[in-house]
Image (cartoon, grey):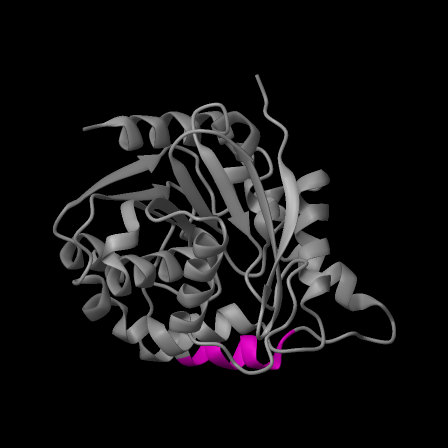
Amino acid sequence: MNQRIKRAFLDTEDGQILYHIGGEGEPILLLHMTPRSSDEFRELMPILAPKKLVIAMDLMGLGDSDKPPRVYSVADYAKSAIALLDELGIKKTSILGSLTGGYIAGEVAAAYPERVEKLILCNVYGFDEEEKDKIFKSYSQGYQIKEDGSHLMERWLARVSYAGTGELNHRCVLDDLKAFNSPVYPGVAVANYCLSAQERFRLIKCPTLILSGEKALEPLEKAGLAKAENQLWLQEAISDSQSVELEGGTLWMINQMPEEILKVLTDFLEKQ
């Protein structure tokens, strides 16, 4: 049975963070990709909540959280995740991070190992120096409003081959629009962090699931932002890890394949 998920805000010195929470049992924190929001977990949270206490936060600068007063680092985002756990009285949790959220989840596990039970890194891809520079430039400039409204169509078409022409793409565009006219802060944070990620992730000691979609790398490859040959770094960096690839999975598979994601998560989280 689906569980009701509630909205709340965490007050921090840098602004408010929106989060969703529901369910009962052992906690799991969900961290979304860029430029999405906790809406990435809309389908998953109600079906995971009967088994777990689920928490999903909007990263600052995206969704309905405030924009940070400065360019945040991945370490800053990790601290904000810890601040939310402290507010909720959660001493230790599992964390699922999707792409951007995966980098932040990995930094939480590296910097605060006593706070992380298990780690799930979903579609977390590596980038080289050239790709890092492209990501930094794109997200530093951010999305700009155009007088003829063509920016709306640009965002609709950006992922239509994978997210489709229906409600999911509409929800993605709404998330895009909330990030307009400012840097896309979490994307900038990952650009500044990604080249050091392998070294940082070597500090991760908790059991880790590396979860990927069969088709998830395609849009990044087509945009010249990632290469298939650079994607063994997670397995090399994290000693206690296992990998699962979902057939047909895309970057948006958490929305598109929630039942399949639920099964993989349940198998991993309940394994002793």
The answer to whether residue 225 is above or below residue 119 is below
Residue 80 image offset from top left, x and y in percent: 47, 64
Q: Is residue 239 left or right of residue 211?
A: left
Occupied quadrant, residue 233: bottom left
Quadrant in the rendering for residue 75:
bottom left
Residue 157 % position (x, y): 68, 55
Position above or below: 145 against 11 = below
Q: Residue at x 58, y 72 (%)?
A: 184
Q: Residue at x 65, y 58 (%)?
A: 63
Choose between 194 and 1: the one closer to the eye: 1
Position in image of residue 104 (x %, y %): 39, 61
| Residue 199 versus residue 244 in the image, above or below | below
Residue occupying the far right of the picture: 148
**Percent position of residue 139, x then y:** 55, 75
Q: Is residue 129 visible?
A: yes
Nearer-the-camera pick, 52 or 177: 52
Q: Is residue 141 magenta?
A: yes
Q: For the C terminus, which image quadrant? A: top left
Q: Is residue 78 magenta?
A: no
Quarter of the figure with residue 214 = top left
Identity of the residue drawn at 27% across and 65% down: 111
Q: Is residue 135 shown to the viewer in this render?
A: no
Looking at the figure, which quarter contains the N terminus?
Answer: top right
Q: Which residues are magenta?
A: 133-142
- From the viewer's perspective, tell me whether residue 134 is left or right of residue 241: right
What is the chief secondary structure element of the magenta stretch?
A: helix
